[in-house]
Image (cartoon, rainbow, N blue to C red):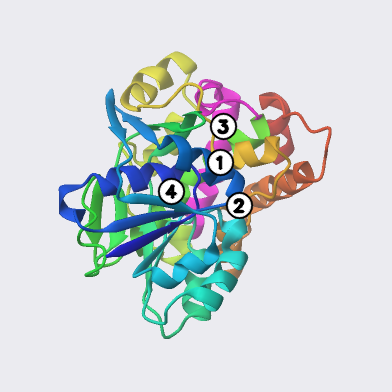
């Protein structure tokens, strides 16, 4: 199989190394497709991924490219960019990809897969979900932290991707469960601090807890099925998040493998004044709430705050107490 990983960011690069070293995928070709300035150092120096103290170097089975025309050679196109890049990716697929190429979406939220299936009704579009963090530790080095495996819909083209990967017949409940975790991204982005620092501040956690409680209420009223992702149950977490710092560290953070310098992609985007994925994440809760006549004031406010920050060149983060006050 020829897999084109469309998006040479941390997720795309990290997974290309893991999957290319998987004994089950021997004989397959992996191509990292990204912007010229991104792929140039990768072409020169290769990639190294660390995971739980283990080191994995990229192999000769990974090619790098900045030419969208290389989609023409793909049996499988794995979308690993942010949702803000989806529109351009769709145009490139329409222009260059073969009609029988399978599309796998690793984008956050549920809206990207819905959009892809609407745009490509005659193609096979598979959902995927990445539960762990992948962060750059150097120009060509990455670290994977956090629990869980990549979840992919079962298909002949995904059955060879087994290194830190699980296959499922239906990913909807898993995607909805991951969305609950991703609600922390907006809090991290508005704090403009590493995620670990946010989670060790009770007031930031109380904001996340309010967003999570609201989302669970929407799920219950909409009869939306979701699976627990990671070691902590969200129904319990919405209470534990309000616990004193010492207790939260003992009950929750001690069970997580969180890189203390890592930030969510939404936080990185906001710091760099790039458009964020707020509509794909918190916006999904607001959309589902509106569909079922459920008010979502907390998530609506977080959406508004992030969008305001996207257009504020002097923006430098919001204090925890101030953020808590804004969502009340």
| Mark 4 / mark 3, whichever is N-terminal | 4
Query: How far across and down, in percent of the image, does residue 273 sit?
Result: 73, 41
Q: Which residue is mark 4?
A: 12
- In the rendered structure, the answer to whether residue 76 lies left or right of residue 278 reads left
Callout in the foreground (3, 1): 1
Callout in the foreground (4, 2): 4
| Mark 1 / mark 4, whichever is N-terminal | 4
Outermost residue, front side: 44
* Label 4: how many Cα within 10 Å (few below 14, some 14–19, many 20+): many
Picture quarter with the N terminus: bottom left
Circles 2 and 1 in contact, beta carbons < 8 Å: yes
Callout in the foreground (4, 3): 4
* Label 1: how many Cα within 10 Å (few below 14, some 14–19, many 20+): many
Q: Is residue 65 above or below residue 255?
A: below
In 3D space, how far apart are the residues under numbered discs 4 and 2 (Cα atoms)?
Answer: 17 Å
Residue found 54% across the figure and 61% down from its top: 67
Q: Which mark is residue 265?
A: 1
Q: Which residue is mark 3?
A: 206
């Amino acid at each position: 199989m020829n897999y084109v990983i469309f998006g040479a960011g941390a997720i795309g690069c990290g997974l290309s190394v893991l999957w290319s070293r998987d004994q089950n995928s021997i004989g397959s070709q992996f191509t990292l497709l990204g912007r010229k300035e991104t792929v140039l150092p990768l072409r020169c120096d290769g990639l190294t991924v660390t995971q739980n103290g283990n080191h994995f170097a990229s192999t000769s089975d990974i090619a790098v490219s900045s030419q969208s025309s290389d989609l023409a050679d793909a049996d499988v196109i794995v979308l690993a960019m942010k949702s803000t890049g989806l529109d351009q990716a769709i145009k490139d697929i329409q222009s260059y990809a073969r009609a029988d190429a399978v599309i796998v979406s690793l984008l956050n939220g549920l809206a990207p897969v819905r959009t892809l299936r609407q745009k490509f009704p005659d193609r096979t579009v598979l959902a995927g979900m990445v539960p762990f963090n992948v962060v750059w530790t150097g120009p060509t080095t990455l670290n994977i932290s956090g629990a869980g495996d990549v979840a992919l819909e079962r298909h002949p083209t995904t059955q060879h991707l087994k290194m830190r990967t699980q296959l499922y017949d239906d990913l909807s409940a898993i995607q909805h469960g991951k969305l609950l975790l991703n609600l922390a991204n907006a809090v991290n982005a508005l704090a403009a601090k590493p995620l670990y620092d946010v989670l060790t501040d009770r007031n930031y956690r109380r904001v996340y807890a309010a967003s999570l409680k609201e989302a669970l209420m929407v799920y219950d009223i909409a009869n939306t099925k979701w699976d627990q992702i990671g070691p902590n149950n969200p129904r319990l977490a919405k209470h534990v998040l309000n616990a004193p710092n010492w207790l939260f560290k003992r009950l929750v953070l001690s069970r997580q493998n969180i890189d203390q310098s890592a930030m969510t992609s939404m936080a990185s985007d906001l710091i760099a004044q790039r458009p964020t994925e707020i509509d794909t994440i918190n916006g999904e809760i607001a959309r589902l709430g509106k569909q079922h006549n459920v008010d979502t004031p907390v998530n609506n406010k977080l959406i508004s705050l992030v969008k305001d920050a996207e257009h504020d060149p002097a923006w430098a983060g919001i204090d925890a107490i101030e953020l808590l006050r804004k969502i009340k």
